[in-house]
């Protein structure tokens, strides 16, 4: 098989607050691989914050931008891609990313997410007075899809350093 089929990218997915960004940056520091945050990439392309895209253009529009970003970023090689928490729910996105990347699911408990995001105002899907219930329900619905569309599940409840090293080791052993 030629180089083109090698999975050179590390793709991190998982629920909002699972630590994708922190772990992604750690992996970048440890490996020297460039790090791309898909939400930041979309914000830069659109010139506005995710919450404003949701407000002004709607979720469906955001999901289209996300799919475009998955296709564009999957063309790159040797990078770390941190997805937004909804990106992997779409099979088309997962298929594009899986062509060039190993997709890691950072699996965390709802309690960890609820605690980390209790004061968050940037995630449009969690702006509810019943945040804990929303997190639990969404996680329950999403977990089977995340598992189906990713390659390897990693326990994300540990320290970012620990999770980063685990991902790097699995990535190196898989190539
Ligand atoms: C979303 C997660 C967010 C962001 C948007 C939608 C989701 O990213 O893409 O608010 O559907 O789970 P993070 O997972 O980085 O918070």
Image (cartoon, grey):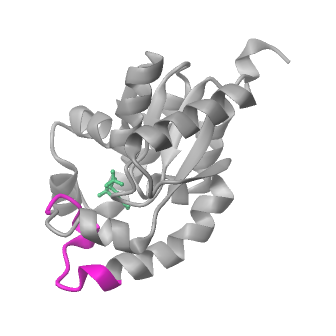
Q: Which is nearer the eye, 34 or 84?
A: 34
**Number of dots carrying numbers:** 0
Residue 80 drawn in magenta: no
Position above or below: 109 against 136: above
Q: Can residue 148 be seen in this view?
A: yes
Q: Is residue 93 visible?
A: no
Which residue corresponds to the image point at 52% horizontal and 21% vertical from the top-left?
76
Position above or below: 117 against 53: below
How far across and how far down the image is residue 161, in percent?
41, 38
Which residue corresponds to the image point at 33% horizontal and 58% vertical from the top-left?
17
Span shown in magenta: 121-133
Side of 48 relative to 139 (left or right): left
Which residue corresponds to the image point at 44% horizontal and 29% vertical from the top-left?
27
User: The N terminus lies in which quarter of the figure?
Assistant: top right
Side of 108 relative to 92 (left or right): left
How far across and how far down the image is residue 148, in percent?
67, 60
Q: Which is nearer the eye, 123 or 31?
A: 31
How far across and how far down the image is residue 23, in percent?
40, 40
Which residue corresponds to the image point at 42% horizontal and 60% vertical from the top-left?
15
């Amino acid at each position: 098989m030629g180089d083109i089929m090698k999975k050179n990218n590390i793709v991190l997915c998982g629920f909002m607050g699972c630590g994708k960004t922190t772990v992604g940056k750690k992996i970048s520091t440890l490996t020297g691989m460039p790090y791309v945050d898909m939400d930041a990439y979309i914000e830069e392309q659109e010139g506005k914050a995710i919450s404003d895209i949701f407000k002004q253009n709607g979720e469906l529009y955001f999901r289209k931008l996300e799919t475009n970003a998955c296709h564009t970023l999957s063309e790159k090689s040797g990078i770390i891609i941190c997805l937004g928490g909804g990106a992997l729910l779409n099979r088309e996105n997962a298929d594009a990313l899986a062509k060039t990347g190993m997709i890691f699911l950072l699996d965390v408990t709802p309690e960890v997410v609820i605690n980390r995001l209790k004061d968050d105002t940037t995630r449009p899907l969690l702006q509810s007075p019943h945040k804990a219930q929303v997190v639990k329900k969404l996680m329950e619905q999403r977990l089977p899809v995340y598992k189906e569309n990713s390659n390897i599940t990693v326990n994300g409840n540990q320290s970012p350093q620990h999770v980063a090293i685990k991902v790097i080791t699995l990535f190196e052993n898989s190539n």
